[in-house]
Amino acid sequence: MSANNLNLHRWMIDTRTLWQDEGALQNSSHLALLSSTTQASILQYYRSADRRMSLASHLLKHLAVARICHVPWNDITISRPGHSKPHYAPPTPSAPSLDFNVSHQAGLVALVATPNPASFRVGADIVCTTERNDLERIERIGFDAWLDAFADVFSASELFDLKYTLPSLRLRDGTSLTAFDLGPAVSRLCAVTATPYTIRSSASGRTYSVLPATVIAAKLRRFYAHWAVKEAYIKLTGDALLADWLRTVETTRLRVPDPVGKGEWGEAVVGCGVDADAEIEMRRDGQRIEDVRIEIRAFEADYLLATVVMALADGEIARDDAFPDWTALDVETDVMPWTAPDRTDVDRSDCGLGV
């Protein structure tokens, strides 16, 4: 099975430079594309950054239905039953449908969608490792105490691993220090002090002076990677973080992708449930989850984007399945043309926007 059989769409809008002027969003033609109820839900946000992300989220969801299901923009209705994820219900059982999920964080808004909802279910999550400035609180109370606040989400074994394990540490010059190089004293470090550690690389023989803050920052990035993967899986199921089974789902193996430069995409770290040697492994109630494919990818220095696809009764995920790259969309050139009522004649075999 190939990426085309999965027929996955992965789109992103960067709102960090959109609708910046005062009143630009309220008076924009983009907001006017949505219903009055949706407009009100967008404008209720206090922070302008949240209003921008909410608008982009609604535009992406409408675009997915218009492009994938060939529904005129003005005929699209997206609902959110109960506490489940947003949902599009086709007018008839035989009409094209889709499963999709949206995530937004620190200006980025991403959507993952599949036109095969009978075969696959999708989940997505974006995290920004620096948006909350967690290091200030960690410096006061320690990384272990800071992590304890997430005991309702992560199992005891996950928390122990996140607190006291660091599989590798990448330095600014590109040097990668292994867990063997770091040793137990550095790997178990939870306090931010001013005293550096001297660490010798087993690969080069060189010694490096590493500040505790560098170690804690790497642990924090690892925490956010685990959070993103778990959140994407939870959103895939349609449940929220209040689900009573959260702690039974564990990410037992995950290689964290390295940060990259501004505007750049890093490597894709992938896990497939049927592959026992994959770089990402998730378990539920101790059993490996085999009907999923998972990816986490870095964008710029601070963002991580996770995607999880689950095969349902009519679907199958194989080791060689692949996800398409993320596609950054421009609102004017990639979204606006689909708002015209006559844009419903696209070939059903089309697989995405500029992928």
Image (tube, rainbow, N blue to C red):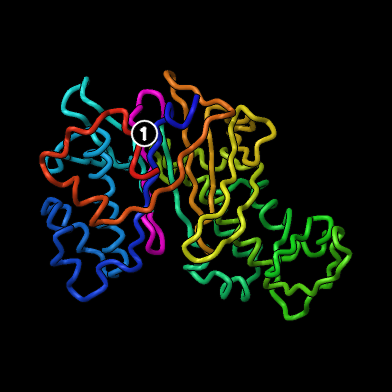
Question: x and y percent of residue 39 in the render?
Answer: 16, 57
Q: Nearer the viewer, residue 239 or 18?
A: 18
User: In the rendered image, which quarter is residue 281 located in?
Assistant: top right
Determine the secondary structure under disc 1. strand
Q: Is residue 145 left or right of residue 333?
A: right
Label 1: how many residues lie within 10 Å, few (<14), some (14-19) or many (20+)?
A: many
User: Looking at the picture, how far across and down is residue 244, in whole percent?
Assistant: 48, 40
Q: Residue at x 83, y 68 (%)?
A: 199
Q: Is residue 251 left or right of residue 164?
A: left
Which range is magenta?
A: 104-120
Task: Please state the horizontal and vertical placement of residue 250, each as a whole percent of the image.
Answer: 60, 41
**Quadrant hosting residue 139:** bottom right
Farthest-out residue, bottom: 194
Task: Compare residues 344 and 227 and report the one nearer the observer.
Answer: 344
Residue 152 percent coordinates (x, y): 53, 50
Q: Is residue 32 visible?
A: yes
Instruction: Indicate yes or no whether the magenta region holds residue 87.
Output: no
Residue 240 quadrant: top left
How many callouts does the rendering have?
A: 1
Residue visible at 46% across and 44% down in the picture:
325
- Residue drawn at the location 22% of the way across and 33% of the way down: 346
The answer to whether residue 165 is seen in the rendering is no
Q: 347 or 48: nearer the eye?
A: 347
* Quadrant including the C terminus: top left
Horizontal side of residue 209 vs 20, given as left or right: right
Q: Which residue is mark 1?
A: 114
Residue 117 counted in the magenta span: yes
Above or below: residue 353 compared with residue 180: above
- Name the amino acid type tagged 1: Thr
Q: Residue drawn 24% across and 50% down?
A: 335
